[in-house]
Amino acid sequence: MEDVLDVYQRPLDDKRPVVCLDESTKQLIKETRIPIKAKVGSVEKYDHEYERNGVSTLFMMVSPLLGWRHVEVTERRTKLDFARCIKSLVDERFKDAEKIVLVMDNLNTHKPASLYEAFEPSEAKRLLNKLEIHYTPKHGSWLDIAEIEFNVLKKQCLNRRMSNEGFLKSEIAAWEIARNNVSGKIDWQFTTKDARIKLRKLYPSIR
């Protein structure tokens, strides 16, 4: 825990940007009846019945000090999908960085081995050499700032039925552009000092 909290206290460094990564899902839902649009004196009406149309995986990548975020929408949650997200961070978004300081939780796909399953060994090693990885502790995924950004996404964009992946991607892309344009930064205030006071029950007792 303290390792991640110390990372969040680092000043902005363009050569070593901090990026938080997390995953979530969105169930795709088709309407069984055409909704009735809202009009003066009447709210929108839609039937409580619906048809499931699959589930999409969302990879959230956010740099809290830069006010940047990107959401990758995929059909599945696999090691290959995770590896492709890492490659896009290294070779596209932060190609000029010396190291990407990556904070993420301990999901089974969030491992260096995933890169070796997706790419040739030399390529996997090249990508890993660009990463400084910090894992949140078990049951401590709340320390991943990407979770905060997911909460914003869900409230502002995903709090409605979406019928297919194409529509989901277009809506998330529009949200992402608007959010990045206002450079919505996340000011993390919880420090190691706070943790030792407020979460002292989590520390071993030394007698």
Image (cartoon, rainbow, N blue to C red):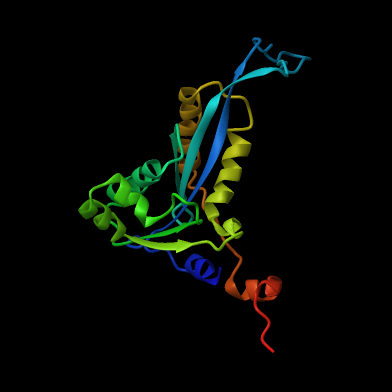
Q: Is residue 175 visible?
A: no
Depicted 108 relative to depicted 13: above or below = above
Depicted 172 relative to depicted 204: above or below = above
Indicate the quadrant containing the N terminus: top left, top right, bottom left or bottom right.
Answer: bottom right
Outermost residue toward the bottom in this view: 207
Indicate the quadrant containing the C terminus: top left, top right, bottom left or bottom right.
Answer: bottom right
The residue positioned 28% from the left and 54% from the top of the image is: 127
Count of picture labels: 0
Quadrant of residue 199 within the rendered picture:
bottom right
Residue 122: percent from left, percent from top: 20, 54
Q: Nearer the viewer, residue 172 or 163?
A: 163
Q: Is residue 97 left or right of residue 107?
A: left
The residue positioned 51% from the left and 52% from the top of the image is: 185
Residue 95: percent from left, percent from top: 27, 52
Quadrant of residue 195 within the rendered picture:
bottom right
The residue positioned 49% from the left and 39% from the top of the image is: 58
Q: Is residue 99 left or right of residue 41?
A: left
Q: Is residue 109 visible?
A: yes
Q: Nearer the viewer, residue 170 or 104?
A: 104
Q: Nearer the viewer, residue 12 or 172?
A: 172
Depicted 204 relative to depicted 33: above or below = below
Outermost residue toward the left in this view: 122
Quadrant of residue 50 within the rendered picture:
top right
Residue 91: percent from left, percent from top: 27, 48
Residue 76: percent from left, percent from top: 45, 35
